[in-house]
Image (tube, grey):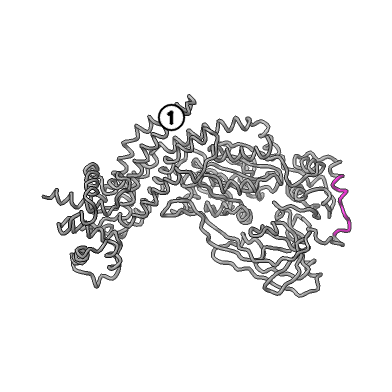
Amino acid sequence: METNELIETAARFVNNTNANIFLTGKAGTGKTTFLKDLANKTHKNFVIVAPTGIAALNAQGVTIHSQFLLPMGTFLPVRDPSGEHSDGARVFTQYTLTRKHPLNAVRKQVLRDIDLLIIDEVSMLRADILDAIDHRLKAAKRNYNQPFGGTQLLMIGDLYQLPPVVKDHEWSILRNHYQSAFFFDAAALRESGFVYIELEKIFRQQDNVFIRILNNLRNNLATEEDIAELNQHYRQDINKNPIPEVVTLTTHNYRADDINRSALDTIDKKSFTYSAEIEGDFPESMYPVETDMQLKVGAQVMFIKNDNSEGRYFNGKLATIKDLDGISITVELHGEKEELVLRQEKWENKKYTIDQKSKELEEEIVGSFMQFPIKLAWAITVHKSQGLTFDKAIIDVGKAFAPGQVYVALSRLRSLDGLILGTRIDPRVISSDAQVINFSKRKDTQTDLNELLNTGQRHYLYHLIESAFDFSAITMQLRQRNSDKLSKTEFEDESMRTALQNIELKFNKEKENTEKFRRQLFGLIKNTDAKLLLDRIEKGSSYYTALFETSITELFAHIAEVKQFTKTKTYLNFLLEIDQLLNKQYIELKAIGYIAQCVLEGTDIDKNSESYQQAKSFREKLLSMSDAFAEDKASRSKRKTGKKRKTGDSSGKKAKGETYKVSLGLFKEDWTIEQIAEKRGMSASTIEGHAAKLIGDGELEVNHFMPEDASKEIAKAIASSDGKGIGSVVAALNGKYSFGQVRMVLAVVQRGAKK
């Protein structure tokens, strides 16, 4: 399969299946480009994480430890307290992770909303940390039956590059649970399995001899002839006579720092220091460059960020400082004669959160780092060279200490013509990890990718149906209102006490129907009757989205009322969890017909499709009416949870009934609801409440506010609602009329019933 075809297949696996994927490939095969394109196109809710701060910045994501609130140390996939395993080392287990490092409500919301977890630079991820991620996702989603709580994983990286870091005392503990420290030996991943996709076409190198040598180094097959070919590029005098406009790649930080410091000291010119501007939360481990950068005219620097505005430079591009004044920096790009005045660049530290109104997963910027996007670059470490490309470089890897280090260094070059060796390559330091090589052989035994894709798409249909047409998670959550502190939240008003119970009853009534419906759809998948399957899905979607729209509307109204009271924080947080759960499944129901069709036809899924937009517009409609949801009832409970929230100074509070008289006078002068609200400094929903009370008292007629045919239509809907509340009436009318209008007609109905 050609590389472009492989990339398309990989994208199809992500979007049209629920299979976990390991996307790998040699240096320069396009893994980073694939990630950027996917992030812009996938219809799934995703977060991007990486093992280190710098890797997270490069991937435009967050660190694994910050996203999942993992403590530093060793994780064991057992439930026992850590003391039984640690012998004084920093060890945490499933038990201690839950008890000592609990997630707050916001983090739980984010994890519950994730459909796709993208892990970049996965070669550096340890198996135990991946199992910790598994535990977090299962707990947040309350789904312990599926690996990662049912979340799909996309893991990107090259195992022949930098391995995970495991200290000897850590491995002495981990070896009892894992075959190796690499991510692929995680217990959760062994349980779930994954698809292995390797991009093979190398875009960086075109030198066939060099490509052959790199492949042999990668696979531990380097011959004496390969080593001899490389060592022909050794220059004994290179350290005494550095080459202008050439960077040295070395194995250790201290070595790179020494080279850069010595080279800078040899320049007999004034030194200038440029300080970074750091705002908010930006951990030191994520600093992309030095906070205080010392530079001189004539210094060799390297860009560590792409120029996104004009495209003049890219990450890894070399330049020479031409002018400094302590404020600005002018450089000359290597290979070009034009000078360039640099601008400071901003790096942002972000976190994922849930917008409490839209319930959509979004990025929140929590800190920033502002500095010029360069660093001294007579030398850099092999570690920091990952992802970079050089036409020419001095390779100093005589003291290579990790498997794959030599391969990483050499693969930064485009060809052998650009290779200069500062030390001879010793065959003893070029080995790749045997466990990695054995693991890579899985690709050879794996079923054909096209066949796996077809199977994965069929399984994804099962997953979609199971997720969309199973309401057990909702009923289980709603049942919690009777437990612990939630059961103690009481309201005097009957409709408030029974609001959740009514929603739960609706879904319980559908339990038997949904089970039958799912079995029917599963049978159609097996029989490969695509036309009938899509038809049944569409009908089921229409039926159940109506149920969800009514329930979400009623929940909105209940939440708005609860917000009027004090001492309800715990209960309110619970309601917001229910809201998120209902909203997510509602979107799934709206989109399932469209997604199923795309999966069956093998077409791309557009996250801006009509079905997604309809789901968003429904919620936006509810949000626009949210101020009108809380009905202005006369009686409130005298308990702590029933005290109405104070809205300001009560010293000038009007006598009971006086506020309605003021509104009545203005209504009789033909003021509109909006005009009265503005004049009195109140919300329109409050004035609508006044209107409803005045109508109920016989002071005003409902047709003062709406045409007769409208009031008759609303009255008919009220009669058909079986007393389920205003929310259900609004939903039954498809939002044609506002809560305030329904409340006014209800006042007429209730007045008639009293007579």
The percent position of residue 468, horizontal first and vertical second, equals 42, 38
Circle 1 crowding by C-alpha within 10 Å: few under 14, some 14–19, many from 20: many
Q: Taking 413 as reference, is 488 left or right? A: left
Tally the marks: 1
The answer to whether residue 236 is magenta is yes
Span highlighted in magenta in the image: 228-238
Using the rendered image of the protein, determine whether residue 438 is visible from the camera's viewpoint. Answer: yes
Between 243 and 93, which is closer to the camera in this rendering?
Answer: 243
Between 724 and 109, which is closer to the camera in this rendering?
Answer: 724
The percent position of residue 443, horizontal first and vertical second, equals 66, 34
The answer to whether residue 220 is magenta is no
Using the rendered image of the protein, determine whether residue 80 is visible from the camera's viewpoint. Answer: no
Q: Amino acid at mark 1?
A: Leu
Quadrant where the N terminus lies? top right
Quadrant housing residue 175: top right
The percent position of residue 21, horizontal first and vertical second, equals 59, 40
Q: Taking 90 as reference, is 636 left or right? A: left
Q: Taking 111 as reference, is 737 left or right? A: left
Between 484 and 564, which is closer to the camera in this rendering?
Answer: 564
Between 687 and 271, which is closer to the camera in this rendering?
Answer: 687
The percent position of residue 611, horizontal first and vertical second, equals 44, 42
Per the picture, the main secondary structure of the magenta-coloured stretch is: loop
Q: Is residue 681 above or below residue 413?
A: below
Q: Under tag 1, what secondary structure?
A: helix
Q: Is residue 548 above or below residue 486?
A: above
Q: Taking 417 as reference, is 704 left or right? A: left
Kindly identify which residue carries mark 1. 521
Q: Is residue 548 above or below residue 101?
A: above
